[in-house]
Image (cartoon, rainbow, N blue to C red):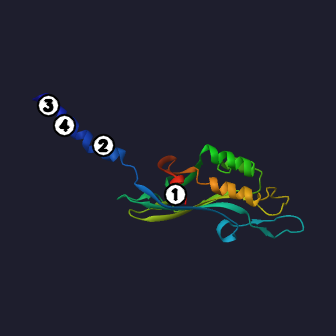
Amino acid sequence: MRKSLVLLMSLFIVLFFLPGCSAKPSLALVEADVDIVKDKSLVGAIGITEGERKGDELVPTALYYRFTIENKGKEPVGSIEEADKGIKLKIEPKDQLKRVSEDVIGFNIYNPDDYNGSGVGFGQSLSSSMDADQKGKYTCTYDLGVSEETSQVGLLVPSKEKLAELKEHAWDAFLVVTIENQEIARFDLNEFKN
């Protein structure tokens, strides 16, 4: 009898604390789109700081991802006050996309360190937190070059054919959502390809 009572109490404790320990945010990717754009309002511009064209701007061509993510849970996700506890996104390319990126651009655009010395970059816009039942809009941009070479930017935009090849394979990746460097959601973008 005493053994049964101890077993019952142990089971109760495990069942009581288990949901709190394993509760992961309930995020859903509800919309995804990818395009190649050259639009200052979307990707910004690179200011020329030297030479005859000092003060002019170059608008890069970029691979531009747009996402809508919904928090289907009952608790808020992320933090506005503490940046390191906020929602962060990362696109993790599968092998084929990584190879196409290296072929088209000359390096893996999904690896931030590979941009060093290129004169262009990458970025994202996002909300660092989401309330329960809220949708958030997010973007990730990867510069692919500019239309004219300068001393600041040596990466020229690839041909239309190469850009089309990159766009075709741009879905061959995972969207990874993290908080405090912990993965909380992963979505296969191939499922959203039109």
Front tag of 1 and 2 = 1
Q: Earlier in the sequence, mark 3 or mark 1?
A: 3
Image quarter of the C terminus: bottom right
> Nearest the camera: 150 or 80?
150
Who's the residue at 68% across and 51% down the image?
109
Alpha carbons under labels 3 and 1: distance apart: 52 Å
Q: For residue 98, say whether it is visible.
A: yes
Vertical comparison of 187 with 39: above or below: above
The quarter of the displayed image where residue 59 is located:
bottom right
The local secondary structure at tag 3 comes to helix
Image quarter of the N terminus: top left
Alpha carbons under labels 1 and 2: distance apart: 33 Å
The local secondary structure at tag 2 comes to helix
The local secondary structure at tag 4 comes to helix
* Lateral position of residue 190 relative to residue 48, left or right: left
Q: What number is the disc on residue 9?
A: 4
Quickly name the residue at label 2: 18
Q: Amino acid at mark 1?
A: Phe
Q: For residue 107, say whether it is visible.
A: no
Q: Earlier in the sequence, mark 4 or mark 3?
A: 3
Quickly name the residue at label 3: 4
Q: What number is the disc on residue 192?
A: 1
Q: Amino acid at mark 3?
A: Ser
Dot 4 alpha-carbon crowd within 10 angstroms: few under 14, some 14 to 19, many 20 or more: few
Front tag of 3 and 1 = 1
